[in-house]
Image (cartoon, coloured by chain):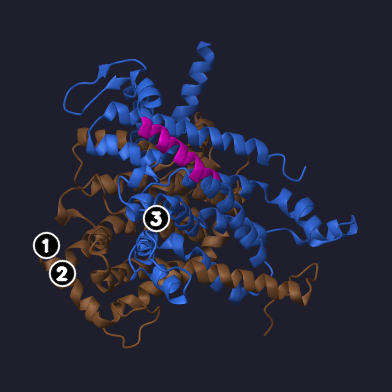
Chain colours: A blue, B brown
Amino acid sequence: MRVKVFHVLQQIHKKKVCYLFLAPFFTLFFLFTVLPVLSAMGLSLTYYNVFELPVFIGLENYIRLFFYDDIFIKAFLNTLTMAMVIGPVGFLASFILAWMLTELNRGIRTALVVMLYAPSISGNLFLVWSLIFHGDAHGYLNSILLNMGFIEQPIQWTTNTRYMMGVVILVSLWMSLGTSFLSFIAGLQGIDLNQIEAGLIDGVRNRWQELWYIILPSMKPQLLFGSVMSITSAFSVGAVGAALCGEPSVDYAVHTIINHLNDHGFTRYEMGYACAISTILFFMMVTSNKLIHKVLRKVGT
Amino acid sequence: MSVLSDRSRFARSTFGNILNFLVLLLVAAFMVIPMIYTISNAFKPFNELFIFPPRLLVMNPTFDNFLGINSILRQSWIPLTRYVLNSVVVTGVGVLGQIIFASLAGFVLSKEIFPGRDFLNKIVVFSLMFSGNVTAIPNYIIFTKLGIINTHLSLILPAFCNSLGLFLMKQFIDQMVPESLLEAARIDGAGEFRIYLNVVMPLCKPAWLTLLIFSFQSLWSTAGGTYIYDEQLRTLPSALTTMIYGGIARAGVSAAVALLLVIPPTLTFILSQSNVLQTMASSGMKE
C-alpha cells in the first residue's frame, strides 16, 4: 500500500508540468461546474435565502415540489412534453438533413449548411418570432392568414393556451439544428468509401440498406455525441417560452422547469428550493442521456 | 453545373434527386425566414412597417432605423457604443481565454499519461450531459461569495472552462497530432511548453478556430441576465431585448439591432465553416 502511494506521488512529481497545464482550466471547471452541481445537491436539503445561513430541513423542498407545488408539476410535465418532441425530432432532423446533404456538390452544400445552421448562430434572433406570432392583425402570420381568408379574426398565438405549446416547440425546433447537425455532416463526409464498396460486394442492394448496415454503424460515435447535445438542449427550453409568451405564461401553459427555477431562485431568492429544482433537472438530463446511450449502442447491430 | 458531386454511390432517380433538393430548400427557407424578415425590417422606413398586410420585403430601403438606435437608447442614458463595447470586451476576453485554457488542458489530456487523467477525461464528458441551467443558481451564489457578481468576470470566467470546448480540442488532438512528431520535438530538446506552442497549436488550427466560432456565438449572444444588473455593464443582446418589447412600433429599430447581433458570428462561421466541419469530424464519443 505504502509503496503504491509512493509510486503515485513519484509519478505526479515526474509529471508536474502536466498539472501546470491543466490547472487553469480545471481550477475554474471545479469552481464553476463541479462545485455548483454538488452544492446544489447540498443546498437542496436546506432553507436558504442568501442573506441568512442555510438551515437544514431534510427532504422538505422535494416534498413541497412534488406534493404541494401544482405549478412545478405543470412545469415538470411541460418540460417532459417539450423534451420528448424537441429531442427526438431535432436529433432525427439533424441526421436526416445531414444525410440528404452529403451527395450535393460542395458549393451548394455549403450554402445550405449555412442556411440550416443559421438559427443556431444567431442566438437571440428567435425574438423575431414574437413579431411573427404577434397577436393582432399586424402580426406577420396573422396578416397572411387573414389576407388569404383562412381566418376571420387574428389568433392570439402566444396567449391562447391552445397554440402556445405548439408555438414554443416550433421555435425550439427551428433552433435545433445545432452542434449535433455539424457533427453529423462531418461524420458523413468522413465515411470510408472502401467500406461502402465492400458493402456493395457483400450484397447491400439499396440506399436504405447502405444507411442501416454501413453508414449508421460507422457513425455511432457521432450519433452518441449528437444525442448528448440534443438531449441537453431539449431539456433546456425556457427562454423561448418566456420571450414569446411572457413569464409567467398564461395559465402556465409553457412554463418549464427552467422558468420555475428562475422564478424561485432569482425572483424570490428561495435558493434552497431552487437548488432542489436544479438537482431534479440535473438527474433528468443525465438519466435520459444514459438511457439513450443504451439504445444507440444497439444501432446497426 | 450538376448539383451532385461525383461521390454518389447508389444513383438516385432524377425524381429522387429533385425531391431531395426541394425538401432541403424548403427547410432552409423556413430557417432563414426570420433572418430575411429581420434584414428587410431593418431597412424599412417607418410608414412601411405599418402597411397592411405587412410585406416580407422592403420597398424603399432606408438607414433611418440604424440612426434611430442611438436616439432611442439616449433616452435611457446609455449609448449604443457602450453596449457594443461591453459585448466586445466580454466576447474578446472570453474567446481568447477559452482557446488558451482548453488547448493547454486538451494537449495534456490527450498526449500525456499521468495519475488522474482518466478521471478528468470522464468528468469532462459527463459534464456535457447537463446544461448551464443546472448550475445557474449555485453559480449565482458562488459569484456573490467571490465578489464578481455584477461584473463582466461573471460572464467571462465560466466561458474559460467550457467543457464542450475542451472536449472538441482533446478529440481533435487525439486524431490529428501524431505521437511521433511530439517524440521528435522532445529529442530535439523542446520542453512541453515549446511543443505546445510550436507543434500542437499550429496543427490544431481548425480546432481552435472552431472554439473561436462556438464561444463567439454564445458569448456574443449573452445578455448577462441575472448576473449583471447595472445597465451600463449590460451587453448588446440586452439592448435588443429592451427594444423588441417595444412591439411593432419599434420593429424597425429592433431589427437593426438584431442585425448588428447576427452579422458578426454569421460571417465568421461562413468564413471558417470548413475548419469547423474538420473539427466536428473527430467529435464522436466512444461510449
For badge 3, the amino acid type reads Ser
> Does the magenta-highlighted stretch encompass residue A75?
yes
Quadrant occupied by the C terminus of chain A: top right
The one of A42 and A70 positioned closer to us in this rendering:
A70
Q: Position of residue B89 (x, y in %)?
A: 25, 58
Q: Which residue is mark 2?
A: B72
Q: Are marks 2 and 1 in contact (CB under 8 Å)?
A: yes
Q: CA distance from mark 3 to mark 1?
A: 30 Å
Label 3 marks a residue whose chain is B
Q: Residue at x 34, y 29 (%)?
A: A275
> Which secondary structure is most common in the magenta stretch?
helix
Secondary structure at badge 1 equals loop
Secondary structure at badge 3 equals helix
Q: CA distance from mark 2 to mark 3?
A: 30 Å
For badge 2, the amino acid type reads Ile
- Please name which of the two marks, 2 or 3, marks the residue nearer to the observer: 2
The magenta span reads: A70-84
